Image (cartoon, rainbow, N blue to C red):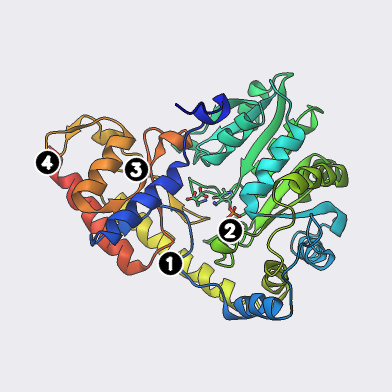
Protein backbone atom coordinates (compact mmCIF):
# COMPACT_ATOMS: atom_id res chain seq x y z
CA UNK A 1 0.00 0.00 0.00
CA UNK A 2 1.53 3.32 -1.06
CA UNK A 3 1.35 6.00 1.60
CA UNK A 4 0.47 9.33 0.03
CA UNK A 5 1.04 12.65 1.78
CA UNK A 6 -1.66 14.11 4.02
CA UNK A 7 -1.41 17.19 1.84
CA UNK A 8 -2.53 15.39 -1.28
CA UNK A 9 -5.02 13.15 0.50
CA UNK A 10 -6.88 16.22 1.71
CA UNK A 11 -6.92 17.76 -1.76
CA UNK A 12 -9.98 17.32 -3.98
CA UNK A 13 -9.41 17.01 -7.73
CA UNK A 14 -10.37 20.08 -9.77
CA UNK A 15 -14.09 19.66 -10.52
CA UNK A 16 -13.93 21.92 -13.58
CA UNK A 17 -11.29 19.71 -15.16
CA UNK A 18 -13.08 16.53 -13.98
CA UNK A 19 -16.32 17.46 -15.79
CA UNK A 20 -14.39 18.24 -18.96
CA UNK A 21 -12.58 14.91 -18.79
CA UNK A 22 -15.89 13.06 -18.33
CA UNK A 23 -17.50 14.90 -21.26
CA UNK A 24 -14.48 14.12 -23.45
CA UNK A 25 -14.62 10.45 -22.47
CA UNK A 26 -18.32 10.18 -23.39
CA UNK A 27 -17.73 11.99 -26.67
CA UNK A 28 -14.88 9.64 -27.54
CA UNK A 29 -17.24 6.74 -26.83
CA UNK A 30 -19.53 8.15 -29.55
CA UNK A 31 -22.08 10.05 -27.41
CA UNK A 32 -23.42 13.37 -28.69
CA UNK A 33 -22.36 15.43 -25.66
CA UNK A 34 -22.98 19.16 -25.34
CA UNK A 35 -20.34 20.47 -22.98
CA UNK A 36 -20.76 23.58 -20.87
CA UNK A 37 -17.88 22.27 -18.73
CA UNK A 38 -14.44 23.83 -18.57
CA UNK A 39 -14.09 27.47 -19.35
CA UNK A 40 -11.99 27.58 -22.43
CA UNK A 41 -12.65 29.55 -25.59
CA UNK A 42 -13.79 27.45 -28.55
CA UNK A 43 -11.84 29.76 -30.89
CA UNK A 44 -8.40 28.97 -32.31
CA UNK A 45 -5.42 31.04 -31.21
CA UNK A 46 -5.14 33.96 -33.70
CA UNK A 47 -2.80 33.09 -36.62
CA UNK A 48 -0.30 35.90 -35.95
CA UNK A 49 0.30 34.53 -32.44
CA UNK A 50 0.71 30.94 -33.67
CA UNK A 51 3.18 32.22 -36.28
CA UNK A 52 5.21 34.04 -33.60
CA UNK A 53 5.49 30.78 -31.63
CA UNK A 54 6.49 28.77 -34.73
CA UNK A 55 9.09 31.36 -35.77
CA UNK A 56 10.54 31.32 -32.26
CA UNK A 57 11.06 27.56 -32.50
CA UNK A 58 12.62 27.86 -35.94
CA UNK A 59 14.93 30.57 -34.64
CA UNK A 60 16.20 28.24 -31.97
CA UNK A 61 14.23 29.38 -28.92
CA UNK A 62 14.65 25.92 -27.47
CA UNK A 63 16.70 26.57 -24.35
CA UNK A 64 16.03 27.66 -20.79
CA UNK A 65 15.25 31.34 -20.47
CA UNK A 66 15.46 33.62 -17.42
CA UNK A 67 13.28 32.15 -14.69
CA UNK A 68 10.87 35.09 -14.40
CA UNK A 69 10.60 35.43 -18.19
CA UNK A 70 12.66 37.03 -20.94
CA UNK A 71 13.31 40.77 -20.48
CA UNK A 72 11.25 41.42 -23.63
CA UNK A 73 8.25 39.39 -22.40
CA UNK A 74 8.29 41.04 -18.97
CA UNK A 75 8.57 44.44 -20.63
CA UNK A 76 5.60 43.62 -22.91
CA UNK A 77 3.46 42.93 -19.83
CA UNK A 78 4.66 46.14 -18.15
CA UNK A 79 3.81 48.12 -21.31
CA UNK A 80 0.38 46.50 -21.45
CA UNK A 81 -0.31 47.55 -17.85
CA UNK A 82 0.84 51.10 -18.53
CA UNK A 83 -1.33 51.44 -21.60
CA UNK A 84 -4.45 49.61 -20.50
CA UNK A 85 -4.59 50.47 -16.82
CA UNK A 86 -2.49 53.68 -16.66
CA UNK A 87 -0.05 51.88 -14.36
CA UNK A 88 2.99 54.08 -15.01
CA UNK A 89 4.56 52.51 -11.89
CA UNK A 90 4.85 49.04 -13.47
CA UNK A 91 8.30 48.10 -14.77
CA UNK A 92 9.55 44.75 -16.02
CA UNK A 93 10.90 44.01 -12.51
CA UNK A 94 7.29 44.00 -11.30
CA UNK A 95 6.37 41.13 -13.64
CA UNK A 96 6.76 37.35 -13.48
CA UNK A 97 5.68 35.11 -16.35
CA UNK A 98 4.43 31.71 -15.19
CA UNK A 99 2.88 28.51 -16.47
CA UNK A 100 -0.59 29.96 -16.67
CA UNK A 101 -2.20 32.33 -14.19
CA UNK A 102 -2.89 29.16 -12.21
CA UNK A 103 0.75 28.59 -11.37
CA UNK A 104 1.34 32.31 -10.80
CA UNK A 105 -1.43 32.15 -8.19
CA UNK A 106 0.03 29.06 -6.57
CA UNK A 107 3.50 30.52 -6.14
CA UNK A 108 2.00 33.78 -4.88
CA UNK A 109 0.16 31.87 -2.13
CA UNK A 110 3.39 30.03 -1.35
CA UNK A 111 5.33 33.30 -1.27
CA UNK A 112 2.95 35.27 0.96
CA UNK A 113 0.99 32.94 3.17
CA UNK A 114 2.17 31.47 6.47
CA UNK A 115 0.48 28.45 8.06
CA UNK A 116 -2.57 29.52 10.04
CA UNK A 117 -3.15 32.72 8.10
CA UNK A 118 -6.48 33.27 6.40
CA UNK A 119 -7.60 33.64 2.85
CA UNK A 120 -10.78 35.74 2.73
CA UNK A 121 -12.69 34.21 -0.11
CA UNK A 122 -15.87 35.73 -1.51
CA UNK A 123 -18.23 32.98 -2.68
CA UNK A 124 -18.93 31.81 -5.27
CA UNK A 125 -15.27 31.33 -6.09
CA UNK A 126 -13.09 29.53 -8.60
CA UNK A 127 -12.29 26.00 -7.40
CA UNK A 128 -8.51 26.32 -7.28
CA UNK A 129 -8.25 29.25 -4.83
CA UNK A 130 -9.08 27.32 -1.64
CA UNK A 131 -7.02 24.34 -2.77
CA UNK A 132 -3.96 26.50 -3.37
CA UNK A 133 -4.32 28.47 -0.13
CA UNK A 134 -4.58 25.20 1.79
CA UNK A 135 -1.50 23.80 0.08
CA UNK A 136 0.30 26.89 1.37
CA UNK A 137 -0.88 26.03 4.90
CA UNK A 138 -3.53 28.73 4.99
CA UNK A 139 -7.10 28.47 6.21
CA UNK A 140 -10.05 29.62 4.15
CA UNK A 141 -12.74 31.98 5.40
CA UNK A 142 -15.63 32.23 2.99
CA UNK A 143 -17.56 35.50 2.62
CA UNK A 144 -20.88 34.42 1.14
CA UNK A 145 -22.21 36.36 -1.85
CA UNK A 146 -25.87 36.16 -2.72
CA UNK A 147 -27.86 36.29 -5.91
CA UNK A 148 -29.77 39.30 -4.51
CA UNK A 149 -26.56 41.32 -4.62
CA UNK A 150 -25.42 39.78 -7.92
CA UNK A 151 -22.90 37.69 -5.94
CA UNK A 152 -20.83 40.74 -5.02
CA UNK A 153 -19.58 41.22 -1.47
CA UNK A 154 -20.06 44.56 0.27
CA UNK A 155 -17.47 46.61 2.21
CA UNK A 156 -19.49 45.90 5.37
CA UNK A 157 -19.28 42.14 4.82
CA UNK A 158 -15.54 42.41 4.27
CA UNK A 159 -14.98 44.54 7.35
CA UNK A 160 -16.85 42.02 9.48
CA UNK A 161 -14.85 39.06 8.13
CA UNK A 162 -11.38 40.48 8.80
CA UNK A 163 -9.41 39.11 11.77
CA UNK A 164 -5.76 39.60 12.78
CA UNK A 165 -5.01 36.33 10.91
CA UNK A 166 -6.50 37.58 7.62
CA UNK A 167 -3.65 37.77 5.12
CA UNK A 168 -5.11 37.69 1.63
CA UNK A 169 -8.40 38.87 0.16
CA UNK A 170 -9.23 37.15 -3.11
CA UNK A 171 -11.00 39.15 -5.79
CA UNK A 172 -12.04 37.81 -9.19
CA UNK A 173 -13.77 40.27 -11.51
CA UNK A 174 -15.04 39.51 -14.12
CA UNK A 175 -15.96 36.50 -12.08
CA UNK A 176 -15.55 32.82 -12.59
CA UNK A 177 -18.06 31.24 -11.88
CA UNK A 178 -20.70 33.99 -11.56
CA UNK A 179 -20.04 35.99 -14.76
CA UNK A 180 -20.47 39.31 -12.95
CA UNK A 181 -18.25 42.41 -12.90
CA UNK A 182 -17.57 44.78 -10.00
CA UNK A 183 -17.92 48.49 -10.83
CA UNK A 184 -15.16 50.97 -10.04
CA UNK A 185 -17.28 52.38 -7.22
CA UNK A 186 -17.81 48.94 -5.69
CA UNK A 187 -14.07 48.24 -5.83
CA UNK A 188 -13.35 51.61 -4.23
CA UNK A 189 -15.57 50.62 -1.31
CA UNK A 190 -13.59 47.40 -0.88
CA UNK A 191 -10.27 49.26 -1.23
CA UNK A 192 -11.22 51.60 1.62
CA UNK A 193 -11.64 48.64 3.95
CA UNK A 194 -8.37 47.05 2.79
CA UNK A 195 -6.49 50.27 3.55
CA UNK A 196 -7.75 50.18 7.13
CA UNK A 197 -6.05 46.77 7.67
CA UNK A 198 -2.33 46.96 6.94
CA UNK A 199 -1.74 43.18 7.24
CA UNK A 200 -4.15 42.42 4.40
CA UNK A 201 -2.95 41.82 0.82
CA UNK A 202 -5.25 41.51 -2.18
CA UNK A 203 -4.97 38.93 -4.94
CA UNK A 204 -6.86 40.37 -7.90
CA UNK A 205 -7.47 37.72 -10.55
CA UNK A 206 -8.14 39.67 -13.73
CA UNK A 207 -7.81 36.88 -16.26
CA UNK A 208 -11.22 37.72 -17.77
CA UNK A 209 -10.45 41.45 -17.91
CA UNK A 210 -11.03 41.77 -21.68
CA UNK A 211 -14.32 39.89 -21.59
CA UNK A 212 -16.88 42.46 -20.43
CA UNK A 213 -20.20 43.14 -22.12
CA UNK A 214 -23.18 45.51 -22.14
CA UNK A 215 -20.90 48.57 -22.32
CA UNK A 216 -19.47 47.91 -18.84
CA UNK A 217 -16.08 49.31 -17.98
CA UNK A 218 -13.44 47.06 -16.41
CA UNK A 219 -11.42 48.47 -13.49
CA UNK A 220 -8.13 46.93 -12.49
CA UNK A 221 -8.07 46.90 -8.69
CA UNK A 222 -4.42 48.00 -8.35
CA UNK A 223 -5.08 51.02 -10.57
CA UNK A 224 -7.27 52.58 -7.85
CA UNK A 225 -4.34 54.22 -6.01
CA UNK A 226 -0.59 53.78 -5.42
CA UNK A 227 -1.34 52.56 -1.87
CA UNK A 228 -3.64 49.87 -3.21
CA UNK A 229 -1.12 48.94 -5.95
CA UNK A 230 1.45 48.33 -3.21
CA UNK A 231 -0.88 45.86 -1.48
CA UNK A 232 -2.12 44.02 -4.57
CA UNK A 233 -0.87 41.13 -6.66
CA UNK A 234 -2.60 41.20 -10.04
CA UNK A 235 -2.99 37.98 -12.03
CA UNK A 236 -3.69 37.84 -15.71
CA UNK A 237 -2.74 35.83 -18.78
CA UNK A 238 -3.50 35.09 -22.38
CA UNK A 239 -5.53 31.88 -21.96
CA UNK A 240 -8.98 33.44 -22.09
CA UNK A 241 -8.61 36.71 -24.02
CA UNK A 242 -6.45 35.27 -26.80
CA UNK A 243 -7.78 31.69 -26.85
CA UNK A 244 -4.43 30.29 -25.63
CA UNK A 245 -5.40 27.90 -22.82
CA UNK A 246 -3.06 25.13 -23.98
CA UNK A 247 -0.03 27.38 -24.34
CA UNK A 248 0.12 27.73 -20.54
CA UNK A 249 1.17 31.36 -20.31
CA UNK A 250 0.08 33.66 -17.50
CA UNK A 251 1.66 36.31 -15.35
CA UNK A 252 1.54 38.29 -12.13
CA UNK A 253 2.29 41.94 -11.47
CA UNK A 254 3.29 43.07 -7.99
CA UNK A 255 5.84 44.82 -5.82
CA UNK A 256 9.37 43.78 -6.80
CA UNK A 257 10.01 42.01 -3.48
CA UNK A 258 7.01 39.74 -4.08
CA UNK A 259 8.07 39.04 -7.66
CA UNK A 260 11.57 38.11 -6.44
CA UNK A 261 10.10 35.71 -3.87
CA UNK A 262 7.84 34.13 -6.51
CA UNK A 263 10.83 33.84 -8.87
CA UNK A 264 12.79 31.98 -6.19
CA UNK A 265 9.93 29.46 -5.91
CA UNK A 266 9.49 29.19 -9.67
CA UNK A 267 13.21 28.51 -9.99
CA UNK A 268 12.71 25.31 -8.00
CA UNK A 269 9.41 24.34 -9.58
CA UNK A 270 9.20 24.91 -13.31
CA UNK A 271 12.13 27.20 -14.28
CA UNK A 272 11.07 29.62 -17.00
CA UNK A 273 7.95 28.87 -19.02
CA UNK A 274 8.42 27.15 -22.40
CA UNK A 275 10.88 29.35 -24.31
CA UNK A 276 9.02 29.59 -27.62
CA UNK A 277 5.81 30.77 -25.97
CA UNK A 278 7.32 34.05 -24.83
CA UNK A 279 7.48 35.65 -28.29
CA UNK A 280 3.89 34.47 -28.74
CA UNK A 281 2.90 36.27 -25.52
CA UNK A 282 4.56 39.45 -26.81
CA UNK A 283 2.72 39.14 -30.13
CA UNK A 284 -0.57 38.63 -28.29
CA UNK A 285 -0.20 41.70 -26.08
CA UNK A 286 1.48 44.06 -28.54
CA UNK A 287 0.22 42.80 -31.94
CA UNK A 288 -3.10 43.42 -33.71
CA UNK A 289 -6.12 43.10 -31.40
CA UNK A 290 -8.92 42.59 -33.97
CA UNK A 291 -9.27 38.88 -33.17
CA UNK A 292 -9.92 39.75 -29.51
CA UNK A 293 -12.55 42.32 -30.48
CA UNK A 294 -14.28 39.71 -32.65
CA UNK A 295 -14.21 37.04 -29.92
CA UNK A 296 -15.54 39.48 -27.33
CA UNK A 297 -18.46 40.40 -29.59
CA UNK A 298 -19.28 36.69 -30.03
CA UNK A 299 -19.13 36.10 -26.26
CA UNK A 300 -21.39 39.12 -25.67
CA UNK A 301 -24.04 37.66 -28.04
CA UNK A 302 -23.81 34.29 -26.35
CA UNK A 303 -24.10 35.86 -22.88
CA UNK A 304 -27.34 37.53 -23.81
CA UNK A 305 -28.72 34.49 -25.62
CA UNK A 306 -27.99 31.94 -22.89
CA UNK A 307 -29.40 34.27 -20.21
CA UNK A 308 -32.66 34.51 -22.16
CA UNK A 309 -32.89 30.75 -22.61
CA UNK A 310 -32.08 29.92 -18.99
CA UNK A 311 -34.47 32.40 -17.44
CA UNK A 312 -37.24 30.93 -19.64
CA UNK A 313 -36.86 27.56 -17.90
CA UNK A 314 -39.24 27.25 -14.95
CA UNK A 315 -37.45 26.91 -11.60
CA UNK A 316 -34.12 28.41 -12.72
CA UNK A 317 -32.97 31.84 -11.52
CA UNK A 318 -29.71 33.58 -12.30
CA UNK A 319 -27.78 36.82 -12.53
CA UNK A 320 -27.25 38.21 -16.02
CA UNK A 321 -23.68 37.52 -17.10
CA UNK A 322 -21.86 40.75 -17.94
CA UNK A 323 -18.34 39.35 -18.03
CA UNK A 324 -16.22 36.19 -18.49
CA UNK A 325 -18.11 33.29 -20.11
CA UNK A 326 -20.05 31.74 -17.27
CA UNK A 327 -23.61 31.71 -16.06
CA UNK A 328 -24.58 30.30 -12.67
CA UNK A 329 -28.26 29.40 -12.39
CA UNK A 330 -29.81 28.60 -9.03
CA UNK A 331 -31.49 25.20 -9.39
CA UNK A 332 -32.50 24.72 -5.76
CA UNK A 333 -36.22 25.09 -6.58
CA UNK A 334 -35.90 21.69 -8.26
CA UNK A 335 -34.27 19.91 -5.32
CA UNK A 336 -36.31 16.96 -4.14
CA UNK A 337 -37.61 16.12 -7.64
CA UNK A 338 -36.95 12.70 -9.17
CA UNK A 339 -35.35 11.92 -12.53
CA UNK A 340 -36.69 9.29 -14.91
CA UNK A 341 -34.96 6.50 -12.96
CA UNK A 342 -36.55 7.65 -9.71
CA UNK A 343 -33.29 9.11 -8.40
CA UNK A 344 -33.96 12.06 -6.07
CA UNK A 345 -32.03 15.15 -7.14
CA UNK A 346 -31.19 16.89 -3.91
CA UNK A 347 -27.82 18.42 -4.65
CA UNK A 348 -26.22 20.29 -7.53
CA UNK A 349 -23.88 17.30 -7.97
CA UNK A 350 -26.75 14.81 -8.36
CA UNK A 351 -28.53 17.20 -10.73
CA UNK A 352 -25.41 17.57 -12.90
CA UNK A 353 -24.77 13.83 -12.89
CA UNK A 354 -28.31 12.97 -13.95
CA UNK A 355 -28.29 15.69 -16.64
CA UNK A 356 -25.12 14.24 -18.13
CA UNK A 357 -26.36 10.66 -17.91
CA UNK A 358 -29.80 11.25 -19.40
CA UNK A 359 -29.31 14.20 -21.73
CA UNK A 360 -25.58 14.24 -22.42
CA UNK A 361 -25.26 17.81 -21.22
CA UNK A 362 -22.15 18.56 -19.14
CA UNK A 363 -22.31 21.35 -16.53
CA UNK A 364 -20.20 21.88 -13.41
CA UNK A 365 -22.06 21.44 -10.10
CA UNK A 366 -21.65 24.44 -7.77
CA UNK A 367 -20.49 22.70 -4.57
CA UNK A 368 -16.80 23.26 -5.23
CA UNK A 369 -17.44 26.91 -6.12
CA UNK A 370 -19.06 27.47 -2.73
CA UNK A 371 -22.41 27.63 -4.54
CA UNK A 372 -24.22 24.40 -3.63
CA UNK A 373 -27.59 25.62 -4.99
CA UNK A 374 -26.16 26.32 -8.43
CA UNK A 375 -24.75 24.78 -11.57
CA UNK A 376 -22.21 26.56 -13.78
CA UNK A 377 -22.46 26.65 -17.54
CA UNK A 378 -19.55 27.92 -19.62
CA UNK A 379 -20.84 29.56 -22.79
CA UNK A 380 -17.49 29.46 -24.53
CA UNK A 381 -19.22 27.37 -27.15
CA UNK A 382 -21.19 28.10 -30.32
CA UNK A 383 -24.74 29.48 -30.41
CA UNK A 384 -25.82 26.20 -32.05
CA UNK A 385 -24.40 24.18 -29.16
CA UNK A 386 -26.01 26.59 -26.68
CA UNK A 387 -29.42 26.14 -28.37
CA UNK A 388 -29.06 22.38 -28.45
CA UNK A 389 -27.82 22.09 -24.85
CA UNK A 390 -30.42 24.46 -23.44
CA UNK A 391 -33.22 22.66 -25.27
CA UNK A 392 -32.05 19.45 -23.59
CA UNK A 393 -31.77 21.16 -20.19
CA UNK A 394 -35.32 22.48 -20.61
CA UNK A 395 -36.62 19.01 -21.48
CA UNK A 396 -34.72 17.54 -18.54
CA UNK A 397 -36.32 20.00 -16.11
CA UNK A 398 -39.78 19.47 -17.65
CA UNK A 399 -39.42 15.69 -17.25
CA UNK A 400 -38.55 15.87 -13.54
CA UNK A 401 -41.31 14.31 -11.45
N1 LIG B 1 -8.22 32.23 -12.74
C1 LIG B 1 -9.48 31.94 -13.13
C2 LIG B 1 -10.61 32.63 -12.46
C3 LIG B 1 -9.70 31.01 -14.13
O1 LIG B 1 -10.94 30.72 -14.51
C4 LIG B 1 -8.61 30.37 -14.73
C5 LIG B 1 -8.88 29.35 -15.81
N2 LIG B 1 -8.31 28.16 -15.70
C6 LIG B 1 -7.33 30.70 -14.29
C7 LIG B 1 -7.17 31.64 -13.29
C8 LIG B 1 -6.07 30.07 -14.80
O2 LIG B 1 -5.86 30.25 -16.15
P1 LIG B 1 -4.52 29.82 -16.85
O3 LIG B 1 -3.74 28.99 -15.90
O4 LIG B 1 -4.93 29.08 -18.07
O5 LIG B 1 -3.80 31.10 -17.18
N1 LIG C 1 -10.70 28.08 -15.48
C1 LIG C 1 -11.42 27.16 -16.29
C2 LIG C 1 -12.67 26.71 -15.56
O1 LIG C 1 -12.95 27.19 -14.49
C3 LIG C 1 -10.56 26.02 -16.78
C4 LIG C 1 -10.42 24.84 -15.89
C5 LIG C 1 -9.57 25.11 -14.72
O2 LIG C 1 -8.40 25.44 -14.92
O3 LIG C 1 -10.08 25.01 -13.63
O4 LIG C 1 -13.38 25.92 -16.08
Q: x and y percent of residue 318 in the render?
A: 39, 45
Local SS, label 1: helix
Cα gap from disc 2 to disc 4, whole angstroms: 42 Å
Of the residues tagged 1 and 2, which is closer to the observer?
1
Local SS, label 4: loop
What residue is disc 2 on? 216
Q: x and y percent of residue 233 in the render?
A: 75, 44
Cα gap from disc 3 to disc 1, whole angstroms: 20 Å
Q: Residues within 10 Å of mark 3 (few under 14, many from 20)?
A: some
What residue is disc 4 on? 340
Q: Can the viewer see residue 315 in this picture? A: no
| First along the sequence among labels 4 and 3 | 3
Q: x and y percent of residue 228 in the render?
A: 80, 42
Task: Kindly identify which numbered label has been placed on residue 301.
Answer: 1
Give me the residue at 23% from left, 59% from top.
Answer: 31
What residue is disc 3 on? 317
Give me the residue at 46% from left, 53% from top.
Answer: 321
In the picture provided, is 62 more to the left or to the right than 307? right
Cα gap from disc 1 to disc 2, whole angstroms: 15 Å
In the picture provided, is 397 more to the left or to the right than 363? left
| First along the sequence among labels 3 and 2 | 2
Cα gap from disc 4 to disc 3, whole angstroms: 23 Å
| First along the sequence among labels 3 and 1 | 1
Give me the residue at 39% from left, 32% from top.
Answer: 372
Do residues under tags 1 and 2 come within 8 Å of each other at their CB atoms? no
| Quarter the C terminus occupies | top left
Give the camera-side residue of 210 and 308. 210
Local SS, label 2: loop
Give me the residue at 40% from left, 38% from top.
Answer: 366
Amino acid sequence: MIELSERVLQLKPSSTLAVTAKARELREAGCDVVSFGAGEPDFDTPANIVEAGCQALKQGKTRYENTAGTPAARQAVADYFRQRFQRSDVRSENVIISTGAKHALYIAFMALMNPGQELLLPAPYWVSYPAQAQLAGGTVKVIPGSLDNNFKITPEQLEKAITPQSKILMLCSPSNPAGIVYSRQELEGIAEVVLRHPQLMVFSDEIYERLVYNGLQFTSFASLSPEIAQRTVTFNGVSKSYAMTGWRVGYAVADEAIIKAMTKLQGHMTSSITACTMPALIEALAGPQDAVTEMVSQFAKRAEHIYKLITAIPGLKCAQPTGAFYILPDISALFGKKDREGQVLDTAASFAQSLLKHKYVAVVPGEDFGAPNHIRLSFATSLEQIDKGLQRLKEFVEELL
